[in-house]
Amino acid sequence: MDAPVVIAGAGPAGLMLAGELRLAGIGVVVLERLPARTGESRGLGFTARTMEVFDQRGLLRRFGEVQTSDQGHFGGIPVDFGLLDGAHQAAKTIPQSATEAVLEAWAGELGADIRRGHELTGVRDDGDGVAVTVRGPAGEHVLRAGWLVGCDGGRSAVRKAVGFDFPGTAATREMFLADLRGVELEPRMIGESLPGGMVMVGPLPGGVTRIIVCERDAPPRRRTGPPPFHEVADAWKRITGIDISAAEPVWLSAFGDATRQVTEYRRGRVLLAGDAAHVHLPAGGQGMNAGIQDAVNLGWKLAAVVRGTARADLLDTYHGERHPVGVRLLMNTRAQGLLFLNGAEMQPLRDVLAELTGYPDVARHLAAMVSGLEIAYDVGGGSHPWLGRRLPRLELDRGGRPSSTAELLRPARGLLLDFAGNAALRDRAAPWAGRIDVVTARPAAGRVPGATTAVLVRPDGHVAWAAPGTHADLPMALERWFGPAPR
């Protein structure tokens, strides 16, 4: 076997997954069709949930000074994201290329084998492994792997080769994205609906201005490359009346509002993550973030199956947990598209929604939906408010030594956090000592619900068991998520 896991695609989802697998000691080969990163960035920044994930893996410091904001929108309607509880706000103006550079360096340092200029051209799953046909600089060859994960974007070669069903709706309109130099435009950060269409304007580092333009009556076109700049400038002038034809285009792209999701995230030994599993209008910058979170959910589960400490059906929880997240992602992006891409007929609905977002509960609900902070997985019955949700960042006192929950989750292992110094609890967890860390600590800062005495946290940061408040006892929860106790 050439590698336990092969990942197709070195975008954010594929690189995040590679790092997660390497933290668990699993060998991984990443195949990327492009010979080098392009520096082009459709996505900007990341949500508060992704900030949490990066903090959990010690990656935030690699981005340097991060500009954050608690202001967001839902379909062009301003929403106060500051109403959300949490240690982090969303990061702004960080190009996706910078995120990819950070993740590629991290995964490479951990030992991931990243092969650029290698294109996946075929897949055969024989039940015992996967044969991956690859076209590289030296010609075509076959890699033998235990598992294959397609993180290769909306036109995924893996998805097509394996025959995953990908139902949804085709694009109904085309949008242009352009990064420009030599033009000064009034910022329109959350977009503005005008009689002829929708426009957005935002500043980028290095004196670059990003614009997005969608002409309301322009049908989608099948393109083999980026649109010519004169098409973008003409559309901008028709909608805004402003001539930008003298600007210098840095990067041009066209995209549509197609909405699709695979019916299954796993088929045999092949899995999908990120845009390979779900495509949608890039409303609120949710696509890259959802892909990164797919990877963090999948990585530790796939690693446990490869190591043999968990049965293969643990991977069924990847679909069970992330497919419903994708359903809500497609729902909210379609709703946002209706709001800010349609014309005056939507204005009454915009006005009603703007009134409703003035109520904190409504604003909090929409902000949590867009940021991913609403996600709670079904991890078993119980009444504890943290159950199935990500463990909030807590500052901890470990017998006089400061620590934090984010620091304890850096190794991507399970964590049993004992707030009460309960020796019997630690004894019950002892058989799983090779798979989880047991830490006794007291919260120094942060809110702990009620009389919580202990929590079991999965490597992805989600709480799998809590005391009191969970119906299952600790060994049952440990076996469910970390496999049978070694004999």
Image (cartoon, rainbow, N blue to C red):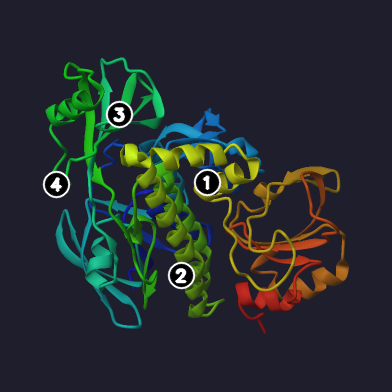
The residue closer to the viewer here, 269 or 196, is: 196
Name the image quarter holding the C terminus.
bottom right
Find residue 269 and report its image quarter: bottom left
**Quadrant in the picture for residue 265:** bottom left
Q: Residue at x 39, y 40 (%)?
A: 101
Residue drawn at point x = 39 percent, y = 72 percent: 266
Marker disc for residue 371 = 1
Residue 324 appears left or right of 365:
left
Q: Where does residue 486 sit, x and y in percent of width and height?
A: 65, 80
Q: Of discs 1 and 2, which sits in the foreground? A: 1
Cα gap from disc 3 to disc 1, whole angstroms:
23 Å
C-alpha span from label 3 to label 2:
36 Å
- Which element carries disc 2, helix, strand or loop? helix
How far apart are labels 4 and 2 at the CA level? 33 Å
Q: Position of residue 164 (x, y in %)?
A: 29, 71
SS type, badge 1: helix
| Alpha carbon distance from label 4 to label 1 | 31 Å
What numbered label is drawn on residue 211? 3
The earlier-in-sequence mark between 4 and 3 is 3
Q: Residue at label 2?
A: 319
Q: Which residue is mark 4?
A: 221
Q: Earlier in the sequence, mark 1 or mark 2?
A: 2
* Amino acid bearing label 3: Ile
Q: Amino acid at mark 1?
A: Ser
Are the two marked residues, 4 and 2, in contact with CB atoms closer than 8 angstroms?
no
- Give the percent coordinates (x, y) of residue 143: 27, 68
Q: Earlier in the sequence, mark 3 or mark 2?
A: 3
